[in-house]
Image (cartoon, rainbow, N blue to C red):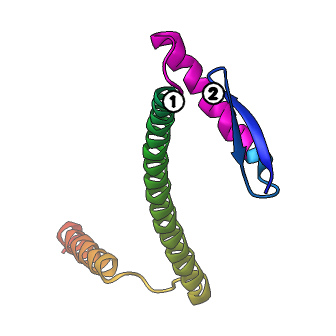
Amino acid sequence: MPEVEIEIGSRVFSVACQEGEENFLRSAAKMLDTEAAVVLGQIGRMPPERMLLMAGLMLADKTAALEDDLRELQDKIAAQDRALRSAEERLADRARRISELQEAGPRTELPDQLTDGLAELTARAEALADDLSPR
């Protein structure tokens, strides 16, 4: 098991890790060192345990905020997915209706309301013609 020396808050620590995880450990140590630098800059010298605790808590706070942001974005994506599925369903329904109308061919019959209206107009026109015609 390899041992890696890392520096956090100007202090060197020797840490063991699994084979192949050295780069991950160095990356995590760098993040912790960045937070430790902030803590030490604000408070000054402190015991290593307290410095590590404060830096770890600051990283945990950032992680919690990122998790909240991630949940919010996942909720937005889920809502957009639902809206997209609904739009796709409406589009597919309209495509089916268009296809059915195209298969049915052109309409040769007139709707009942239109034929009833035309019959009524014809009757009125004939009545007017009868009234106007000489007897």
- Decide if residue 106 is in sight here: no
Q: CA distance from mark 2 to mark 1?
A: 8 Å
Front-most of residues 44 and 47: 47
**Residue with the most extreme bottom position:** 104
Q: Quadrant of residue 112?
A: bottom left
Name which residue lies at 56% across and 24% down: 36
Q: Does the magenta portion include 64?
A: no
Residues shaded magenta = 25-48
Q: Main secondary structure of the magenta part?
A: helix
Q: Please state, as top left, top right, bottom left or bottom right, where the C terminus lies in the image.
A: bottom left
The residue that disc 1 covers is 55
Q: Does the magenta portion include 30?
A: yes
Front-most of residues 55 and 118: 55
Name which residue lies at 62% across and 25% down: 34
- Residue 90 coordinates in the image, percent (x, y): 48, 70
Q: Residues within 10 Å of mark 1 (few under 14, many from 20)?
A: many
Tell me: residue 31, above or below residue 94: above
- Residue 79 coordinates in the image, percent (x, y): 43, 57
Tell me: residue 98, above or below residue 20: below
- The mark found on residue 130 in the picture is none
Tell me: residue 52, above or below residue 9: below
Name which residue lies at 27% across and 80% down: 116
Task: Say what secondary structure mark 2 lies in.
Answer: helix
